[in-house]
């Protein structure tokens, strides 16, 4: 049950990332790079979340999530209110690396939550 919910949350994260990334920008175009923190954090969470389910060959997952971020940046060039930004792609990739490292520290969170849930019954 926990694993199903975890997968659902992961797919929801992908959909939200895609929708937010291709919608008109919510942050003002002030010329600052504050949005890079949002990119970094978002992709760190996305990578960490999926890395809890994909425990073998996580490097392939990391490549896939980084390519997802790069593809979104390219797709932004096709939208009227967005434009691709190499620094955003770099922030996305940095977040992927951070999420991968965090998953090495907490390698199987869904199993821990399932065990905790079972022990409370």
Image: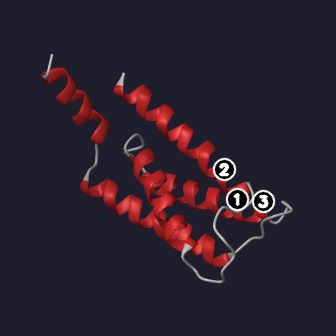
User: Residue 28: image x %, image y %?
Assistant: 66, 71
Label 2 vs label 3: CA separation?
A: 10 Å
The answer to which of 81 and 101 lies nearer the viewer is 81
Q: Residue at x 71, y 59 (%)?
A: 71
Q: Quadrant of the N terminus?
A: top left
Q: Badge 2 local density, few (<14 within 10 Å), some, or many (20+)?
A: some
On residue 75, the disc is 3
Label 3 vs label 1: CA separation?
A: 5 Å
On residue 18, the disc is 2
Q: In screen coordinates, is 48 left or right of 69?
A: left
Determine the secondary structure under disc 1: helix
Q: Please tell me in which quadrant of the rendered image residue 97 appears.
A: bottom left
On residue 72, the disc is 1
Q: Residue at x 44, y 60 (%)?
A: 44
Determine the secondary structure under disc 3: helix
Callouts 3 and 1 close, C-beta under 8 Å = yes
Q: Disc count in the image?
A: 3
Label 2 vs label 1: CA separation?
A: 7 Å
Callouts 2 and 1 close, C-beta under 8 Å = yes
């Amino acid at each position: 049950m926990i694993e199903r919910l975890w997968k659902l949350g992961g797919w929801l994260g992908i959909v939200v990332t895609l929708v937010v990334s291709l919608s008109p920008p919510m942050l003002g175009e002030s010329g600052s790079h504050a949005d890079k923190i949002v990119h970094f954090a978002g992709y760190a969470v996305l990578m960490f979340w999926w890395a809890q389910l994909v425990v073998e060959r996580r490097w392939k997952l990391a490549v896939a999530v980084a390519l997802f971020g790069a593809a979104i940046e390219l797709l932004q060039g096709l939208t009227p209110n967005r434009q691709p930004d190499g620094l955003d792609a770099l922030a996305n990739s940095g977040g992927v690396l951070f999420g991968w490292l965090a998953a090495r520290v907490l390698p199987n969170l869904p199993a821990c939550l399932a065990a905790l849930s079972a022990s409370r019954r």
